[in-house]
Amino acid sequence: MVTTDENGDQRQDQKHQDGQGENQDIFKEGSSYTGPHSLPPSPCEDSPCLIGSTKFDPYPGAKNIMITGGAGFIGSWVTRHMTVQYPHYRIICFDTLDTPASHENIRHLFKLPNFVFVRGCITKVPQVMNCLRKYEIDTIMHFAAQSHVDLSFGNSFSFTIMNVVGTHVLLDCARKWSKIDRFIHVSTDEVYGEVDNEASDLIEASLLAPTNPYAASKAAAEMYVNAYYKSFKLPVIIVRSNNVYGPNQYPEKIIPKFTISLELGLPLFLHGNGTHKRRYLHASDAANAFDTIFHRGKVGQIYNVSSTDEIDNMTVSRKILAEFGFVTEEQFNDRVQHCKDRPFNDMRYAVDGGKLKSLGWEQLVDFEDGLKSTIEWYRTWGLDWWGGEDKVRECCSAFPSPKRSIFEDDVSGELVEFENHQVQIGKCLVSIGYENEEMAEDGEQKIVEPTARKSNDLLRGLKDTFNMDTLRSLLD
Ligand SMILES: NC(=O)c1ccc[n+]([C@@H]2O[C@H](COP(=O)([O-])OP(=O)(O)OC[C@H]3O[C@@H](n4cnc5c(N)ncnc54)[C@H](O)[C@@H]3O)[C@@H](O)[C@H]2O)c1
């Protein structure tokens, strides 16, 4: 097997020929891997390769599709779907393999010749540019994000960095690459904020009014997407989906978390009084929605993806308990513990999905069926999927602890500057600017000493923005 490291050097070593140790090398930061090949055995090897059901005539402008966040939950559904349903597209999964990701989500694809995995971060210009150039990318489907609302209350700056700066980097690299035919930006219904019970479902032109830091970062990212459409004619499409559930979702969100908690005999921590409602869409329907939008959507448009199943958290808990045979009030009270609510918790979201339906998409999986099969999947594979019982057990607490706080765990208080326009914010190294970038003779990207005044200004600007004293004083 051939891997490519971040310097563009290719190598084939004995370990790969023996089929040993691929994980370490394939998943090394900056490495990329082209199939076909098999990953080493794991307890999840016989898991099904889950995809959606739609299949369209090939889109003429598409050959090489980069899917950011393709090893995460929704991204992996779309990555598997596109790789399996469309063998003539080459699918390049670009993912940093953050905690919610799992290489199990894309395990089966390593056997297919039209699949490529690149371990890279959307905040790093050189890694993004290398990927665009090396694989001649013509389409970007951008799923990568910090996606957990609960974490955003404790560590909102990493949401700004990944979701806003990361999206900005990706947009600007796409602009510079200038060969992008479609840039599908994955946003969320949360950008609209809370919707009253009596209010009509919101159409795509409705006001954005996010209420939590996660939603704010997604709304901010959308502003950049729109600006790049208007200013640079980047062919963008924005998608705002309801809550998605199903197999492959890291057990930090309610359905997998409660299922795993019951499996491990742990309490179910219900936020507040449990009356908050969400609309739930099965991941296979979400995969179909992205496939439909990719093949039939129009550039410059926004599409809501809406489910018909609106359910409050208390009811979700009862339904999951029932699947484990716990149906009495006493059994409910034994297992469910009400805990404090989020600092702010939207009562409900409600989007109108008519525009997407007019492209031919429809919801195929109702919540009852989808929930049953999802619970079955987690009971079969859930403990092994993300590296064992101890790892998933950590997800079952009432609230997650923000592990990557720039104030607590991982920052000395100093902003460290690196060469090549990099700044370190906490553990996150952001690479900005490419004025000093050159193409090496072999076609690989090369970075030379930074000299351009413009990029130094940019660096200073970012340094000021993320000055730790300023940030702390804002919080005091
Ligand atoms: N889950 C939902 O219900 C839902 C609903 C609407 C919209 N969304 C949006 O859909 C997208 C995917 O959500 P999800 O639930 O699948 O999330 P997820 O957390 O399961 O997956 C996110 C993926 O992005 C990757 N990633 C994170 N930061 C990265 C970086 N800097 N560079 C490269 N990769 C990075 C992670 O490793 C992970 O694989 C997000 O943009 C989210 O805002 C999710």
Image (tube, rainbow, N blue to C red):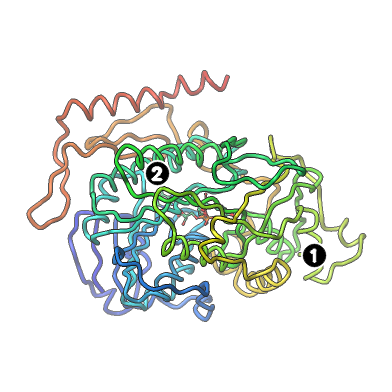
Which residue is disc 1 drawn over?
A: 321
Residue 345 x/y as whole percent? 70, 40
Q: Single out the residue that lies furthest toward the front.
A: 358
Q: Nearer the viewer, mark 1 or mark 2?
A: 2
User: For the residue labelled by badge 2, is the local secondary structure a helix, a strand or a loop?
Assistant: helix
C-alpha separation, residue under disc 1 versus residue under disc 2: 39 Å
Kindly indicate the quadrant of the structure image that contains residue 193.
top right
Looking at marks 1 and 2 on the same chain, the residue that comes earlier in the sequence is marked by 2
What number is the disc on residue 262?
A: none
**In the image shown, does 298 or 280 lie closer to the viewer?**
298
Identity of the residue drawn at 54% across and 43% down: 403
Q: Is residue 332 left or right of residue 290?
A: right
User: For the residue labelled by badge 1, is the local secondary structure a helix, a strand or a loop?
Assistant: helix
Q: Amino acid at mark 2?
A: Thr
Which residue is disc 2 drawn over?
A: 167
Identity of the residue drawn at 59% across and 36% down: 210
Q: How many C-alpha atoms fall within 10 Å of the one at disc 2: few (<14), some, or many (≥20)?
A: many
Point out the image quarter for the N terminus.
bottom left
Q: Is residue 81 left or right of residue 139?
A: right
Residue 229 x/y as whole percent? 36, 42
The image shows residue 406, relative to residue 104, as above or below, that is above
